[in-house]
Image (cartoon, coloured by chain):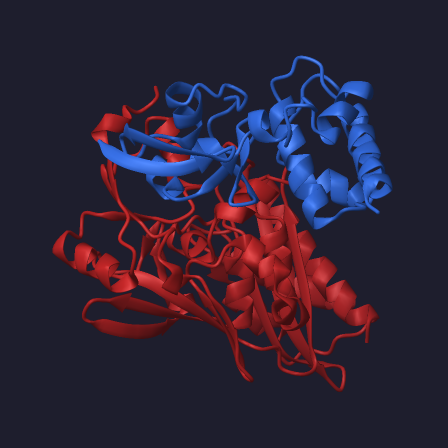
Chain colours: A red, B blue
Amino acid sequence: MRSNVHDFSLVAPPTLSEALKLLASDPALTPIAGGTELMVALSAGRLPQRQLLSLHQVRELRFIHANPETIVLGAGTTFTDIRRHEAIAEDLPLLTAAASWTGSIANQNRGTLGGNIVNASPAADTPPALLAYGATLTLISSAGMRTMPYGMFHLSYKKTALAPDELLYSVTVPRRSPGYRSYIRKVGTRNAQAISKVAIAALAKIEDGIIADVRIGAASLRETPVRCAATEKALTGQTISAAELPRLVAAASSALASEAKPVDDIRSTAKYRAAVAANLIEEFLEQLATSG
Amino acid sequence: MTEITLTVNGQLQTVDLPSMKRLLDVLREDLGLTGAKEGCGEGECGSCSVLMDGELVNSCLVPALQAEGAHITTIEGLSPETTAPLHPIQQCFLEHGGAQCGICTPGMILATHHLLAKHPQPTMEEIQEGLAGNLCRCTGYMRIFEAVEQAAKASAESTP
């Protein structure tokens, strides 16, 4: 059943400070940016929020700053903005790749990085890359700003650390440190437009044939986007080579099985997700072993 | 009700409507522009595609208030002059059988327009990616891709 639009209200303050003031006075307001999530719920008659706060017109949220050590993206940055940014393509290729397969071109023109994070879907496309890169979030309210590691933002299914009077302001991503190699793959029903069945983004640093550091972010393996800490631990300090590969893959698969808690839903099954996630980790390790 | 002013196909329009009304419904119901179609109503099919400030968007996912001050181009406004009722892209779709039932066609043509603005000479991969958000259940896509290739060629030939 379609919603009756007369039951809903939308306000569109021109500036960030006015938006924060409105949110502080009425924390029941729900922010809406590109509408690629909430408008779908509206059309389907399952949008519980009745009062919405538009962020689309707040220009202060839409920016990309390339600093020497970090790239800072405003929460209102669209996926198209990310795809068109050369410094991101150069230094944060996992993020460019994730943006390139988020929805369609029309969705990428409207959907925002902030919405992708705050909507808190376990299947969202950019979180695995942001987790692997060790991104930091800056949250803002009329009382001030605070920062937190992105890894601490998701508390449980669709629950985040964002307070009712807060907005996500920006995402800070460290620029690639030298010597890291990266991997990302999304498995969905089709290449374009599909919501992931499972996705993995990973970075590793190899020193003298040893995995010195490894970071793995995953989508659709638990109730929130997650870092695969047990798998990372099982791989860190291990020798990576063609001869060692089977042993390493077995160790990683077993660690991944201990921490992955995928579910059955309309897009896939828990069994399929667990098997494919292990295959993706294997592919990542194969690439590390063969490319040196 | 909220008063919203926007430019549609070059004409300034002021409409009084609920702020969360979908742009698609504003175009079809309030402005009588029924070229944009509703397929899925959830941003998957692209039948409701329009250009908003030059960018391709699904008009079913745009709340009316967010279109305040925006420049919208629908299929009705794509052809620039009354003497040439069809835009060259429309002409190529016609000649190559890129349209059958017609539900996806306005969106396909606007997505093609957006694609060619960014990639005047697109590769087949770029064409496929550019139209990946527009579903067609009639043509099997090959004739659409041929129409897009022809439109790119025609555009290159007409550019001095």
Instruction: Work out which quarter of the rendered image holds the C terminus of chain A and state it.
Output: bottom right
Judge whether B34 appears above or below A90 on screen: above
A209 left or right, relative to B13: right
Residue in the image at 63% along x and 72% along y:
A87
Judge whether A100 appears above or below A91 on screen: above
Q: Quick one: A143 or A217, which is closer to the camera?
A: A143
Q: Residue lying farthest top?
A: B101
Q: Residue lying farthest left?
A: A25
Whole-percent x and y of residue B132?
67, 37
Q: Quick one: B32 or A91, which is closer to the camera?
A: B32
Q: Quadrant of residue B101?
A: top right
Q: Quick one: A130 or A102, which is closer to the camera?
A: A102
Q: Residue lying farthest front?
A: B83
Whole-percent x and y of residue B151?
79, 34
Whole-percent x and y of residue B111?
64, 36
Residue in the image at 60% along x and 39% along y:
A193
Q: How many marks?
A: 0
Q: Residue lying farthest bottom?
A: A208
Judge whether B55 appears above or below B8 on screen: below
Say if residue A190 shows up in the picture: no
Instruction: Work out which quarter of the rendered image holds the N terminus of chain A and state it.
Output: top left
Whole-percent x and y of residue B122?
79, 45
B159 left or right, relative to A84: right
Residue in the image at 39% along x and 60% along y:
A59
Say if residue A253 shows up in the picture: yes
